[in-house]
Image (cartoon, helix red, strand yellow):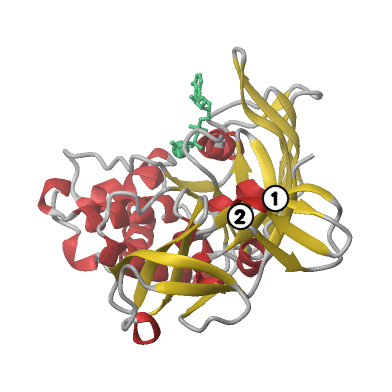
Amino acid sequence: MWESKYVNQNKGDLVVAEVKIQSVTKMFGEVKAVNDFNAVIADGEFVSILGPSGCGKTTMLRMIAGFERATYGEIYIGDKLVSSSQANKFVPPEDRNIGMVFQSYAVWPHMNVFDNVAYPLKIKKYSKQQIMEKTTRALELVHLEAFSKRLPNQLSGGQQQRVALARALVGEPRLLLLDEPLSNLDAKLRESMRFEIKELQKQLGITVIYVTHDQAEAMAMSDRIIVMNQGVIQQSDMPEFVYESPANQIVADFIGLVNFIPAEVSAENIILPSINHILYSPGYRAGKALLAVRPEHIVMTTAENIGVSGTLLHKFYLGDSIDCRVAVKKEIIRVIGKASVYQHFQSGDEVTLQFEKIMVFPQD
Ligand SMILES: Nc1ncnc2c1ncn2[C@@H]1O[C@H](COP(=O)(O)OP(=O)(O)OP(=O)(O)O)[C@@H](O)[C@H]1O
Ligand SMILES: [Mg+2]
């Protein structure tokens, strides 16, 4: 197996793959695809960039790789400045020692698996023996050693995606950039590949920047998630913080499910006119706000105790859980709970909702 840290063969010293991005902006004409992006990705860290389609994820990744030039700002890989608008410096992709799997993972159809993976080494004029050794190792890593003679059209989508991954790893990069590498796979294969990529990263000790718009994927794999919207970083935190304490309503809406209810915050209460309800909840800044409650943080009962009364409109059976829509005055509130707890509820039932955990986002 591979060493867990790569030793730079020219210098004989340990290569550190910290990535530092300072005030990076990318303009495409009038479009600001990435707007003042600042981040430090630690050596060996697994960081996801997450956000809706068109928010600038691929553009940011391509600037780190060197396929796109930042309009403003600086990018460092290790202690090396690889891109600077001010110093007018730009290190081309081939000199950045990065492995990358693109959004549309392209494997060359006319080359067999072995030649696809060996290609970057041939370009770099490695010896025949080195090519044989390194390519075999990369194929072992993605469990494709038995497929080396096959052509891509004789492989499943997941196997092709692993060929792309092996090709990104074969040059022993210190930094691996993955742009939606699992986008074309079915749910089950995605899940097993998530696990394999994560294992690979731990085993090799490399830094990974992983772009996705799939929040479950980002949550499951990352040490840290950077949430973007319209080119701007909204939050950069560990997955549990992004979910539990979203920085703003955009993040709350994008990560997990959430009900939003218009609110008026006073010294001690949160007034919810649209559902004709008042929550005693001191400590929030007074003024117009949006109350956010996740469907799994609402308890639905038939007891007529303190809470919000409503009518159960629909329930959707999801196997382990039940997803309910409850009409409360002007709002439809979504409630999700264990199937075993909610199975006896019927559409039309009068129910009471209790908000167990709330988030409040000021609107001014
Ligand atoms: N070469 C280009 N020329 C002009 N505009 C571009 C170019 N590449 C990207 N853009 C624009 O920049 C913005 C960000 O695009 P980007 O590809 O980074 O989004 P993304 O977050 O990767 O989206 P997706 O999840 O759909 O892949 C978009 O508005 C896009 O239309
Ligand atoms: Mg993209």
Provide residue 330's location: percent of width, then percent of height.
52, 50
In the rendered image of this protein, does residue 174 appear above or below residue 58? below
Q: Amino acid at mark 2?
A: Ala
Q: Identify the image quadrant of the C terminus.
A: top right
Query: Furthest-bottom residue in view?
Result: 340
Query: Would you identify the image quadrant in which residue 326 lies?
Result: bottom left
Q: Residue at x 64, y 61 (%)?
A: 242
Q: Is residue 37 left or right of residue 145?
A: right
Q: Check disc 2: other Cα within 10 Å, few if <14, some if 14-19, many if 20+.
A: many
Q: For numbered disc 1, what is the local secondary structure?
A: loop
Q: Is residue 251 left or right of residue 152?
A: right
Q: Does the Cβ of the disc 2 residue fall within 8 Å of ligand 1? A: no
Q: Identify the image quadrant of the N terminus.
A: bottom left
Query: Would you identify the image quadrant in which residue 32 lies?
Result: top right
Q: For numbered disc 2, what is the local secondary structure?
A: helix
In the rendered image of this protein, does residue 81 appear above or below residue 42? above
Badge 1 is on which residue?
A: 248
Mark pair 1, 2: CA separation: 6 Å
Q: Residue at x 34, y 39 (%)?
A: 104
Discs 1, 2 touching: Cβ within 8 Å: yes
Q: Which mark is residue 252?
A: 2
Provide residue 222's location: percent of width, then percent of height.
56, 64
Q: Check disc 1: other Cα within 10 Å, few if <14, some if 14-19, many if 20+.
A: some
Q: Amino acid at mark 1?
A: Asn
